[in-house]
Image (cartoon, rainbow, N blue to C red):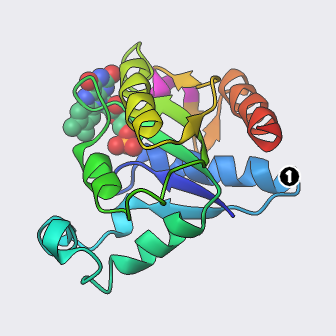
Amino acid sequence: MISIISGTNRKNSVSKKIAHIYQTILEAKGEQATIISLEDLPIDFMGTALYENSGKNELFNPFRELIAQSQKMIFVVPEYNGSFPGVLKAFIDGMKYPDSFRDKKAALVGLSSGIQGAGLALSHLTDIFNYCGMHVLAQKPKLSRIEQNLTENKLSELYHSLLEEQVDKLLKF
Ligand SMILES: Cc1cc2nc3c(=O)[nH]c(=O)nc-3n(C[C@H](O)[C@H](O)[C@H](O)COP(=O)(O)O)c2cc1C
């Protein structure tokens, strides 16, 4: 199973729009993918689903199951304060260890208002996933100045082609 994780719980996020575009690209290449949006996380999951509460939150458990079943994952990651959103780290910390990520494969897509395209965020996340034993595809599109490159749910030609190239590599990965 392939999952696309929209990496923020911010409402009406650009990340979620890009996750949907990514899903469409995969579909055009004959692959189905499930979108996991952190926007749908139970609001209290940090206090009710982590550590000693692990497995006890019935609204959070389906997220654990979806990640457990995913063999390939695409993370769409916005740049927040020079890194990735804290909610994404809490989400990762709430997954079953070590089987959720070990020996699996990931592709990362970064986006930002500024010029970095979440490059540092993707490096931070790569370190974490490598620590967890997950292989991360080397090609990581960094979608900088995203507001100028996304109009009415459509990416600029260049950014769309970067995602298509990444999908081709991910399917062979
Ligand atoms: C909390 C927060 C921190 C941000 N920090 C940065 C930043 O460090 N660099 C940057 O270029 N943009 C930053 N931005 C802008 C976001 O990267 C940009 O608006 C992106 O499209 C947000 O994605 P989202 O809509 O999926 O939340 C920040 C936005 C938020 C909400």
Residue 10 appearing in the image: no
Residue 80, above or below 171: above
Q: Which residues are magenta?
A: 145-149
Q: Name the quarter where the C terminus is drawn.
A: top right
Residue 171, above or below 9: above
In front of the other: 60 or 155 = 60
Q: Which residue is mark 1?
A: 28
Identify the residue at horizontal 37%, vertical 36% (top origin).
Answer: 128
Q: Quadrant of ligand 1?
A: top left
Q: Main secondary structure of the magenta part?
A: helix
Give the x, y percent position of residue 110.
Answer: 48, 30
Horizontal side of 33 relative to 51 (left or right) equals right
Q: Amino acid at mark 1?
A: Ala
Identify the residue at horizontal 29%, vertical 62% (top origin).
Answer: 94
Residue 147 included in the magenta stretch of the image: yes
Identify the residue at horizontal 37%, vertical 59% (top origin).
Answer: 97
